[in-house]
């Protein structure tokens, strides 16, 4: 490890003071014809220099410090994760060090730099919080440490420890929260509500005793006759249906309302919806689309504009979706809805629920409607259109000045045109969701559950 010695504040002040005295002596000699005992100044200068050199030599004999980092291999974007540091050393007296870990610019942190008091012959530990702001591969470089020389005249800095690699995934923490709440039927705490139905499902589930509110069509007369009490059939939503998640990876999805882009919010939402669908017994596939004209669906492993993950089934397969999209990024291209619809028609011939997430403008509406009609020939289509949060903020803002009135009128017109486009999609038989990025996961999850509950797929 290569060490760097930097003069401490004490050493700088000592030399600055001596330099000031020497200058004052020269000034006094020249103008006032008086002179201090200059040899004392020279001895003082050389004395400080010798002490500094001695301190430098002593500091070279200090034992090395090694840092071992404990970093989870999988991180969730925009979520705080503790990172633990273990400091190994052989100091024989208490020593205070400062540690700044090798956090990349794509991540936020708290509690850095760390100030740690090392005790003789003991391993020390400390931790800080890390929040990655971008998905994909993440590498933390070696740690930087700093401590003082024995006499405090030098600050010694060097790098120690090894680099650590991790993967930053979409927000899989929401999946864990949903799984916990679902076991206790408390998913409404996340805003996700499943409509309860009695006897209106597509598949027979079980026989049970009749409850008030059940329809007469649910009664099983043979079982009622055998048991001499009213027995009803219980139904469940149809399983083993096909769900396809289509995610726009065009340039408009790079917009941000907070620290995450709309594309990141879309991936987080689709990840949660995919887990819910897999838990429902459906199979889930995923396709991203941008301005790519490549028609080879098998060449998409490194293609950010067009990536296809074939149908997966079973909640354990959510890891396949995670690894398939964790490094996916929005491109600079314009999304081509019609080309994407044509590709999907080839990739997914079986009737499916298509959930398309995008951020469209008025000029895209005709193409988006054509693509929806193309998909609707075989599939059930839901389009989730992300709305910028600033539109809602401006719409709710009070009008005080003429400029405020102009802004308000422009926003109202934009929202009206957006509402008309929403109505056109709905009238064409498309399930349409219009919401902000923060609302996306809950709104799409509830829409999926309503479609399942209605039995229209």
Image (cartoon, rainbow, N blue to C red):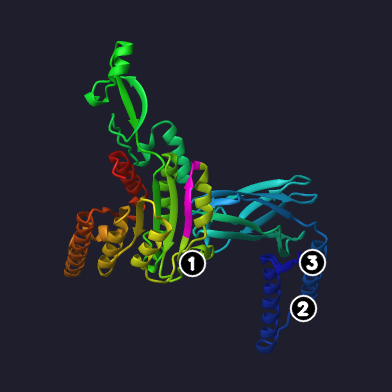
The span picked out in magenta is: 308-315
Q: Is residue 233 left or right of residue 42?
A: left
Label 3 vs label 1, nearer the camera: 1
Residue 296 image label: 1
Local crowd size for mark 1, using a 10 Å CA cut-off: few (<14), some (14–19), many (≥20)? few
Residue 411 % position (x, y)? 21, 64
Of mark 2 and mark 3, the one earlier in the sequence is 2
Q: Which residue is mark 2?
A: 37
Of mark 3 and mark 1, the one earlier in the sequence is 3
**Any part of residue 146 in sight:** yes
Real-space CA distance between mark 2 and mark 3, rounded to the nearest whole angstrom: 29 Å
Eyeballing the image, is 51 above or below 215?
Answer: below
Q: Which residue is mark 3?
A: 56
Whether the residues at callouts 3 and 1 have beta carbons within 8 Å, the answer is: no
Local crowd size for mark 3, using a 10 Å CA cut-off: few (<14), some (14–19), many (≥20)? many
Q: Secondary structure of the magenta portion, mostly?
A: strand
- Viewport quadrant of the C terminus: top left
Q: Is residue 90 left or right of residue 278?
A: right
Residue 160 % position (x, y)? 71, 59
Of mark 1 and mark 2, the one earlier in the sequence is 2
Residue 113 % position (x, y)? 60, 57
């Amino acid at each position: 490890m290569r060490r760097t010695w930097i003069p401490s504040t004490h050493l700088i002040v000592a030399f600055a003071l001596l330099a000031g005295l020497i200058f004052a002596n020269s000034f006094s000699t020249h103008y006032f014809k008086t002179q201090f005992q200059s040899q004392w100044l020279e001895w003082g200068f050389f004395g400080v220099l010798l002490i500094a050199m001695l301190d430098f030599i002593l500091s070279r004999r200090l034992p090395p410090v090694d840092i071992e980092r404990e970093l989870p291999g999988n991180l969730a974007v925009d979520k705080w994760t503790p990172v633990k540091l273990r400091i190994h050393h052989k100091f024989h007296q208490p020593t205070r060090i400062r540690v700044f870990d090798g956090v990349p610019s794509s991540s936020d942190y708290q509690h850095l730099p760390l100030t740690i008091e090392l005790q003789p012959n003991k391993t020390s530990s400390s931790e800080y919080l890390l929040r990655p702001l971008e998905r994909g591969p993440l590498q933390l470089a070696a740690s930087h440490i700093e401590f003082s020389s024995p006499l405090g005249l030098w600050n010694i800095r060097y790098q120690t420890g090894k680099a650590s690699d991790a993967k930053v995934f979409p927000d899989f923490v929401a999946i864990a929260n949903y799984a916990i709440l679902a076991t206790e039927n408390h998913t409404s705490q996340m805003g996700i509500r499943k409509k309860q139905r009695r006897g209106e499902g597509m598949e027979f589930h079980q026989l049970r005793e009749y409850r008030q509110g059940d329809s007469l069509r649910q009664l099983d007369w043979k079982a009622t006759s055998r048991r001499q009490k009213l027995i009803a059939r219980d139904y469940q939503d149809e399983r083993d249906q096909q769900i396809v998640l289509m995610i726009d990876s065009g340039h408009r999805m790079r917009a941000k309302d907070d620290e995450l882009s709309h594309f990141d919010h879309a991936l987080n939402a689709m990840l949660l919806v995919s887990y819910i669908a897999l838990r429902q017994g459906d199979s889930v596939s995923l396709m991203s689309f941008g301005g790519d004209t490549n028609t080879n669906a098998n060449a998409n492993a490194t293609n950010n504009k067009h990536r296809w993950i074939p149908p997966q089934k079973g909640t354990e397969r959510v890891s396949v979706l995670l690894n398939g999209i964790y490094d996916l990024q929005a491109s600079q291209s314009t999304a081509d809805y019609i080309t994407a619809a044509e590709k999907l028609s080839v990739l997914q011939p079986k009737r499916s629920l298509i959930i398309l997430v995008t951020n469209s403008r008025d000029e895209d509406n005709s193409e988006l409607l054509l693509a929806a009609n193309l998909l609707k020939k075989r599939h059930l289509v839901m389009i989730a259109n992300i709305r910028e949060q600033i539109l809602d903020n401006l719409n709710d803002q009070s009008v005080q000045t003429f400029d405020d009135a102009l802004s308000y009128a422009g926003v109202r017109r934009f929202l009206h045109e957006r509402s008309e486009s929403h109505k056109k999609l709905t009238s064409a038989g498309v399930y349409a969701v219009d919401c902000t990025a923060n609302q996306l996961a809950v709104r799409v999850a509830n829409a999926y559950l309503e479609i399942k509950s209605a039995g229209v797929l």
